[in-house]
Image (spheres, rainbow, N blue to C red):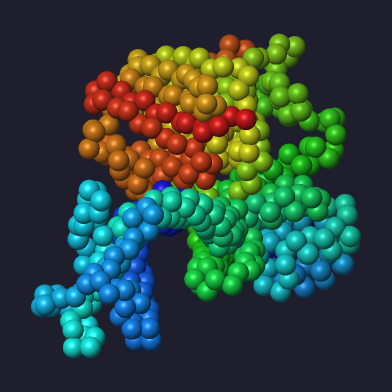
Amino acid sequence: MKLLTKLTLTSTLSKIATVILFIILLPVLIDRVAFQSTNRLLKQQAKKVMTNIQTNGIDYYLQGDSTYGSYTLLREEYISLERAKHIYSPDTIQTAQRIIEGDTVMYRILNQAFEYNDQLYELEIGKTIASISQYNGPLQRIALYVLGLLTILTLLTDISFTRILLKPLQTIIQTKLINPVFPFKEIPSPIRTTTIDFKYLDNSLIELMKRIKEDFDREREFTSNASHELMTPIGILQTKMENLLLLNDLDETAMEKIMEMMKTLNRLKKIVHSLLLISRIENDQYARQDTIQPGRMIGEIIQELTHRLEDKNIRMTVVLQPLVTLRKMNHDLLFQLFYNLINNAIRYNKQDGGIHISDTLTVDGSYTVSIRDTGIGIDPSDIDTIFNRFRKKNTDGEGYGLGLSIVKSIADYHGIKLKVVSEVGTGTTVSVIFSSVA
Amino acid sequence: MKVLIIEDERGMALEMEDFLVKAGYLCDLAFTAKQARQLMEESPYDFILLDLGLPDKDGLLVLEDAKKSCPEASYIILTARGKLEDRIKGLDLGADDYLPKPFSLLELQSRMQAISRRKSGLKGNLVALGDFTVNLNTRMISYGDADIDLSKKEFDLLSYMLLNKNRPLTRMQLSEHIWGSFSDDDYDSNYIDVHIKNIRKKLTEHGTVEWLQTIRGVGYKIKL
């Protein structure tokens, strides 16, 4: 999941949780607030009654009677004052039922006892519960609307702000990881951001790129030097042997020995060549700018290998689509790749065997050239290691175990995938898969 | 033919000189760019074989200067660095050919002869081979009026041996010439035998080919 989505989701969920919690608690809270303010109101009213009694005397209410009672028109509030012999519940506020004119109504009731002229009185003031809770419903609804609106608003600002905050991450990925083509010609400049974490990431990546570039440049330098240091002595030996062979007074044994030496030297030369080739490919020293027609190239290779095909009497069938072109390739390297694969198909084939080269072009634009032979095959357990350097299973004195390593390096260099399917005794099919033929 | 060998590895330079002198060239040696400049100022050369890895000056700059003082000469670049850019730059600067080290002396001479042939034009490239006549430009071999049909590889092989006549050539040297860097000695030497057999068969229909000798265990030689 994307970080932006995750952050948005987290903030949405937490907001929703808060809102739900608030909505659940709201009635309780409102009730509490309503009761408290009712209590206060009742106390104030009681105080007012007491003040009236203090200033105007008890008869202000009683007017000679032993009780006084009054209620509002809709019986929302009532007041009663009466003489009392005992005080049962002095100074309480409670919720209780009262029957007024035949109706049973729930009231919040304040009871207060007091003494006036040595006589005990009890004052009771009540307020209906219904009138207390009358605003709960609308309040809850309004709260819900306001909260909902606020949640959506904050969510929108959250998303756009997170987007802005995360933008440098996008830029870092784009400029440091996606855009740079290996090997790096130049290191991209640091991005502008005030987020320390992103700065840290950006700088770390720049450091890493610098290190890779340095290693890479060193490697390139090394390949060039190694090539010189190895090839020069081989060259001197080769010319010396060639001149030796030209001496007139050589006997047959001497000549044969010189020839053996030349063969060995040649082998050394080939190994060094191959290793340097792999090293140069991995070091990006080849341009990828050629446009290639695989059909034509494979035709040339087969021409080149005719003598080997004839020697084993191998039947070669090639069914390739004529109009396919591969762009951004290195001609020589791709030639080498197909050459090595076809050469192997011949080398590890049986006498009178066959090789079938075909291609497929899929809808998604990938293009596959398959080389199928009727050779000795590869053991399933060995398939994963056939591309390793100096790995050769069928030692019959041929090859140096570098042919397929070269193939692998060239494939990797061009973003070509290789697939090997093989059965011992039946043959091997190597598929060369080009991801997109534009 | 005068050849200037500019090569800082003495061992290499001396072997090249040894070989080319035997092949009938006059050779001067220069181990540094400075020596080379002095020699070029003193006399003109037909061939300048230039190693790019000189100690005192970048080989490509040497080539640039040399082209000014010795414009008539043919240049072959020799290098062990094997950088692709060097090769392209070298040929851009007017080098006639490029040989990566290590190279075979036979290959060097064959390249030199190819350049000479190219520069001298189409005329006078008929070489007698016993009773046969080889035209190196049209790549035809004939016996009297009869043209003999050799395959491309067979002709390559024959003309290479002809260029290196009176020298024993190993199967490996021959296959390396024919198949270049793709040659595979254990594998391809046998085909040299097959090709030689075919050449012999095609030619003996017209005349004798005693000049094409087999050197047991080694290879072949054209003895003229």
Picture quarter containing residue A297? top right
**Up-down: is A196 above or below A418?**
below
Q: Inspect this view and state whether residue A337 appears.
A: yes
Residue A303 can be seen in this image: no
Q: Nearer the viewer, residue A433 or B157?
A: A433
The image position of residue B35, as x and y in percent, is: 76, 72
Question: Which quadrant: the C terminus of chain A?
Answer: top right
Query: Which residue is at the front of the view, A344 or B184?
Result: A344
Up-down relation of residue A379 to residue A223 (above or below): above
Q: Quadrant of residue A113?
A: bottom left
Residue A417 vs residue B1: left or right?
A: left
Q: In this view, does B71 lie to the left or right of A200?
A: right
Residue at 44 percent across and 24 percent down: it is A370
Asked if residue A156 is positioned above or below residue A113 in the image, the reply reads above
- The residue lying at 78 percent from left, 37 percent from top is B117
Q: Give the residue displayed 76% in from the left and 42% down from the top.
A: B115
Classify residue A178 as left or right of residue A66. right
- How many marks on residues? 0
Q: Which of B89 and A194 is in front in this view?
A: A194
Residue situated furthest bottom in the rendering: A118
For image coordinates 54% across by 41% down, the residue present is: A414
Percent coordinates x, y for residue A216 in the rendering: 53, 63
On the image, the x and y values in percent for residue A358 come to: 47, 19
* Image coords of residue A279 (percent x, y): 49, 54
